[in-house]
Image (tube, grey):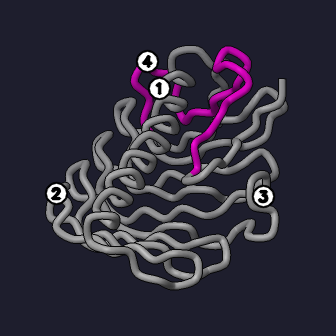
Amino acid sequence: MLLVFTLVGCMTPTVLNDARNWTIELASSEPSPSGPCLIYDDMHRLMLDGTLVSGKMDGIWTSTGSDGTRLVKCSYHQGVRHGPVRMWFGALRYPEASGQLKLEGAFADGGYDGTVTRYYSSGTKQSVRVYERGVLKSSQYWSPSGVEAPPAAAARDAEFEHMQDMAYLSTLEDMVMRSLAQAHREVRK
């Protein structure tokens, strides 16, 4: 089966195969491996790459679409989102915007921290959300034509975008955990 990331709205992936058909390349064969990690789909296309420390995501992890387009770069520390995050539009849902920046921000101890900016596929600014240690402090939202939304509407949109972001990143993290548990393991020498 073909792995397809269908990027609907704010990048909700649909995985059309299961981890038993994937390959995970690790630096060691330990049950809780450490070192570089590459995860491939059933057609041996790179899906995720990063580093594990005692079986937990650490450092920068990159998600790649089945066409090779970079979709996400997110930083982790001991399995927790921590540091910069960037997302890009994928070629399957937005062929005209493939590879363009969709979101940029940062995490601290698992929650957004600071300014998170989201862009439309046209490149214009869609929203700006400001967080303080995971708590949304303010938000602004603009229509595709540049009209700013009232504060109540911006707050609703911010909550919706936040839920989509977290769901998407959780899906990628789940792919790593499922790969560790189910994928065919190859040890790099």
In this view, 169 is above or below 116: above
- Res. 54 image quadrant: top left
Name the residue tied to disc 4. Answer: 31
Query: Under tag 2, what secondary structure?
Result: strand
Q: Are marks 4 and 3 in contact (CB under 8 Å)?
A: no
Q: Is residue 48 left or right of residue 42?
A: left
Query: Under tag 4, what secondary structure?
Result: loop
- Tell me the quarter of the image containing the N terminus: top right
Image spot of residue 15 (x, y percent): 67, 30
Name the residue tied to disc 1. Answer: 177
- Kindly identify the amino acid type of the residue bearing the numbered disc 4: Pro
* Label whose residue precedes the other's in the sequence (2 or 4): 4
Q: Are marks 1 and 4 in contact (CB under 8 Å)?
A: no
- Kindly identify the amino acid type of the residue bearing the numbered disc 3: Ala
Whole-angstrom CA distance, mark 2 to mark 3, is 32 Å
* Label whose residue precedes the other's in the sequence (2 or 1): 2
Magenta stretch in the rendered image: 11-34
- Kindly identify the amino acid type of the residue bearing the numbered disc 1: Met
Name the residue tied to disc 2. Answer: 135
Query: Under tag 1, what secondary structure?
Result: helix
- The numbered dot on residue 15 is none
Does 22 appear in magenta? yes
